Image (cartoon, rainbow, N blue to C red):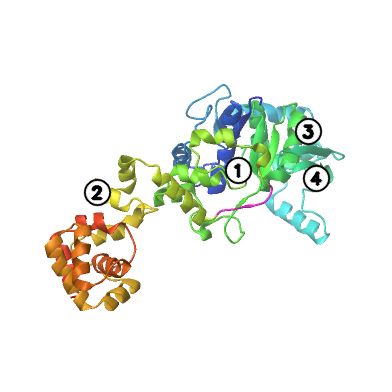
Amino acid sequence: MSAVVTRFAPSPTGSLHLGNARTAFFSWLWARRSGGRFILRIEDTDAERSRDEHRAALLDDLRWLGLDWDEGPDVGGPAAPYAQSERGAVYAELYARLERAGAAYPCYCTAEELELSRRLSRMAGQPPRYAGTCRALGSAERAQRERAGRRPTLRFAVPADAQVEFVDLVHGPQRFVAADIGDFIVRREDGTAAFFFCNAVDDSLMGVTHVLRGDDHLTNTPRQLLLLAALGLRAPAYGHVGLLVGADGAPLSKRHGSASVREFREHGYLGAALLNHLFRLGHAADAEIGWLERDQMPAHFRPEHLGRASARFEESQLVHWQKEALARLPAEAFGRWLGGDASPEFIELVRHNVVLPADAAPWRAVLAAEPPALDVEAAQVVADAGAPFFAAAAAAYEEAGADLKALARALAQRSGRKGAALYMPLRAALTGRTHGPELGPLLKLLTSESVRRRLARYA
């Protein structure tokens, strides 16, 4: 496979959305699979919404996921700078080239005039594209508008008879006609670059060979191909993957719970678990492939297996991969993840019974001095066992102590019970619930006084 150059180009206007993280991950996988390069570019031309803290958080979240980049704002590279807010001089030269070629023109239409034009188009049953009002303005008319204080945008002049054909890496052959596109803005009235322009030209100037993005960008591609052709710049190959949706089929958002990488991270999910889940969302991995370490993933990535259909994100599947990740975590790392100055004994006790750090809180409470409250199921088990059973249990504990096997033998002799009929009410009285970590290690972590009080409570 020839070397592939991919990129991830986030806007620092908020947290890293899970869908964008998946796009970054697939792009990273493709570059790493081919021995190519992965570029990080910050698209921060929206000065009003872009924030330095968002940019820092984006880079931090990508590193947490384990995605590294070969070129970017913090590591440099031959196409620097990698923040679009610093590339104004590059864009200015390209704007001038378009204007000299007659491929772009200043547009003085106000927001109100454009909205009226769109309304009239909709009323006439036509698509709400730009009507070309300023395309044929002469120099005198332009000067008149300048004197009136109107600040122009710069629009790309779409060739009237143009047809754009390309093969999408995911959706296959595509064909668009210029009549459905309309002239579009490449420079805003404040002088900053519009997405259609800077996104396309930077991909070309930075040597990007393959662009992966969500299929909501599919209709942007003909505009960008026309623009690159007018500038004489090489176009990358484009692939548009199905969007990430929630369990209800709607685009993944806050109403589904967590929607950003940062939220999953703060809840305690591990980056390796998130990668294993994302690897299988919109990418048909081989059925026999189970858990993969990050560095194993590129070899199993198949660009031709990227899907057109929306990919359904279900947290229950992420929980599966979280359990797989935790099972592989060394005890010391597990303790750091769990937090709260957990002892080695407590770590060993709960490591197979928690998915997130918060899941350990009930077991910390169980080990506290005060007897735990019984849940509904445990209360029924305790009631069914009856006071004589717990009187026998208290006596057996005085004889056997915290050795569960010895305690069970002594209690079996006194109560006549065995198996679940013996262990279940004992667990319920000691922990307040009928399930959880192994009872033997838990019994050893409880103080003698605490065990006595819990058994005596029901005797």
Circle 1 residue? 285
How far apart in space, not on screen, are marks 1 and 2 (Cα)? 38 Å
Amino acid beneath label 4:
Gly
| Nearer the camera: disc 2 or disc 3 | 2
Q: In the displayed image of the protein, which residue is found farthest to the top?
A: 78
Amino acid beneath label 3:
Ala
Q: Is residue 169 visible?
A: yes
Q: Quadrant of the N terminus?
A: top right
Does the magenta-highlighted stretch encompass residue 230?
no
Q: Mark 1 and 3 residues: CB-CB less than 8 Å, in contact?
A: no
Circle 2 residue? 345
Q: Quadrant of the C terminus?
A: bottom left
Which is more N-terminal, label 4 or label 1?
4
Q: Mark 1 and 2 residues: CB-CB less than 8 Å, in contact?
A: no
User: 409 or 309, which lies in front?
Assistant: 409
Q: Is residue 305 left or right of residue 423?
A: right
Q: Is residue 397 left or right of residue 265?
A: left
Q: Secondary structure at mark 4?
A: loop
Which is more N-terminal, label 3 or label 2?
3
Q: Mark 4 and 3 residues: CB-CB less than 8 Å, in contact?
A: no
Q: Examine the image and state in which quarter residue 139 appears.
A: top right
Query: Which of the numbered marks, if any, corresponds to residue 132?
Result: 4
Give the magenta part as a residue range: 308-313
Q: Secondary structure at mark 3?
A: loop
Circle 3 residue? 103
Q: Would you place residue 421 above or below residue 131 in this image?
A: below
